[in-house]
Amino acid sequence: MTRKLDVLIAGAGIGGLAAAASLLVRGHHVRVFEQSPKLGEVGAGIQVSANGVKVLYDLGLKDALEKVVVRPQAFEFRRYDSGELLQRMPLGASHEEAFGAPYYHVHRADIHAILAAKVMELAPRAISLNARAVGFEEGPQGVTLLLEDGSRHSGDVLVGSDGIKSAIRKGIMGETPAIYTGHVAWRATIPKERLPADIMEQVVTLWCGPKNHAVIYWLCSGQVLNFVGCVEHEEWEEESWTLKRPWGELKAAYEGFHPDVQTIIDAIDKDQCYRWAMNNRKPVHNWSTQRTTLLGDAVHPTLPYLASGAVMAIEDGAVLARCLSGDEDIPAALQRYQRNRSDRTARIVNESTEHGSFYHITDAEEMKRAFAERNITKSRAEWLYCYDPLQVELV
Ligand SMILES: Cc1cc2nc3c(=O)[nH]c(=O)nc-3n(C[C@H](O)[C@H](O)[C@H](O)COP(=O)(O)OP(=O)(O)OC[C@H]3O[C@@H](n4cnc5c(N)ncnc54)[C@H](O)[C@@H]3O)c2cc1C
């Protein structure tokens, strides 16, 4: 690399930290501004497929990850009441062989802590806390990030990775409210000791129900079970990972589900049920100015039905770092980044939305037919998991 850029990043979520690490390893100077008083993530899991894990491995995080992840053997789709297996997508060794990296289940706090430690190893003072971005100003020579406390921070490039309510997005595109999708997600984690020993193998099971589905998988080296309950819910509600709701509402939403699902719901700590209203935005194809760009949920929030929101943010950071490390000037590099990311991210957002209705089919025969007509393993292999953000040709 010939030039070293001074990169400002707003937001230290999984996306912002992955981008920071990807830029730091390429020799850039990076400063990350996070609104929260301390670094952290909520108590829930995520799935990370090979296309994201490759980037994490390239950052040297394999050993740290291996201590905390679960490598699921398969993705199983089951009918909510009978438990009938509708389709099975092999993961484990076959995912790794096909795509060059494993499929992981990881606790959000663990992956976040691993990324934060990497950023601090590369640049111990890179992350500022209590640093809420409110806007930016830019000119031909650079960009200035404006913080709520009145301070101003100048650099060559600004990256908004400040999530769904992004202040940086607002500065680029004006007010573009996120749209409530009519879906909420319950989340809970359950220690293994609270469950029958044989409750579930090391797979991820998606229980497809009439107006709801549940995704259940192991985390933390198999010590914790992660429950995500996606429910169609007409009324808009506050969008927050930290909004607690009564356990009874969760239980009622899954009435009629298989006894295994009931056993898992019964084991959830009654005071630890959180419900998150899920929002979406119509995909956009132009999200950069001359000096400022976006990544992750700030630009393409998605329903989680392809388990790819955080993975997309990790991919974004890797591709952005490649573009900024090339020979083009900064405006051209930012255009190149979004040009190479927009179709893929739009496809993920659109297909994730489409999966909501696919998982929620009431009629048993119709559900069977829908699954029989769709080869999930093949279609995801063809476009989703085979993408390599480190090697893909950039046009
Ligand atoms: C139920 C559910 C399940 C999911 N499962 C998966 C999955 O299995 N796999 C997967 O890949 N994805 C999954 N996702 C999606 C994933 O959680 C998100 O796409 C991902 O967390 C986005 O990361 P981000 O860094 O872009 O944004 P965020 O995680 O929202 O991080 C934004 C950061 O910016 C900070 N911030 C916000 N505003 C400001 C500001 N003005 N100034 C400074 N800092 C600011 C925030 O405090 C935060 O730290 C799921 C989502 C949901 C809702």
Image: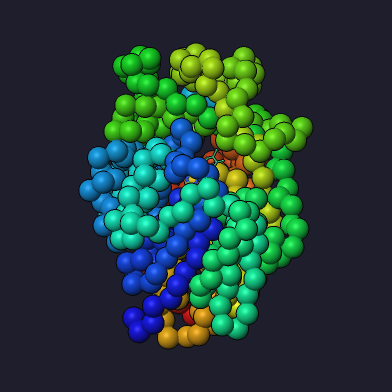
Q: Residue at x 50, y 56 (%)?
A: 33
Q: Measured along the vertical axis of the image, is residue 129 above or below residue 199? A: below
Residue 70 is situated, as x and y percent measured from the top left of the image, at 31, 37
Q: Residue at x 53, y 44 (%)?
A: 36
Residue 55 is situated, as x and y percent measured from the top left of the image, at 35, 59
Please identify the quadrant where the N terminus is shown: bottom left
Asked where in the image residue 387 lies, by quadrant, the reply is bottom left
Number of dots carrying numbers: 0
Q: Residue at x 59, y 17 (%)?
A: 247
Asked where in the image residue 134 lies, by quadrant, the reply is bottom right
Q: Measured along the vertical axis of the image, is residue 103 above or below residue 119? A: above
**Residue at the front extreme, as displayed:** 150
Q: Nearer the viewer, residue 201 or 55?
A: 55
**Residue 98 visible (yes or no):** no
Decide if residue 361 is on the left or right side of residue 221.
right
Decide if residue 72 is on the left or right side of residue 177.
left
Q: Measured along the vertical axis of the image, is residue 315 above or below residue 130? A: below
Asked where in the image residue 248 lies, by quadrant, the reply is top right
Decide if residue 54 is on the left or right side of residue 379.
left
Residue 230 is situated, as x and y percent measured from the top left of the image, at 59, 33
Residue 386 is situated, as x and y percent measured from the top left of the image, at 40, 61
Q: Residue at x 33, y 60 (%)?
A: 123
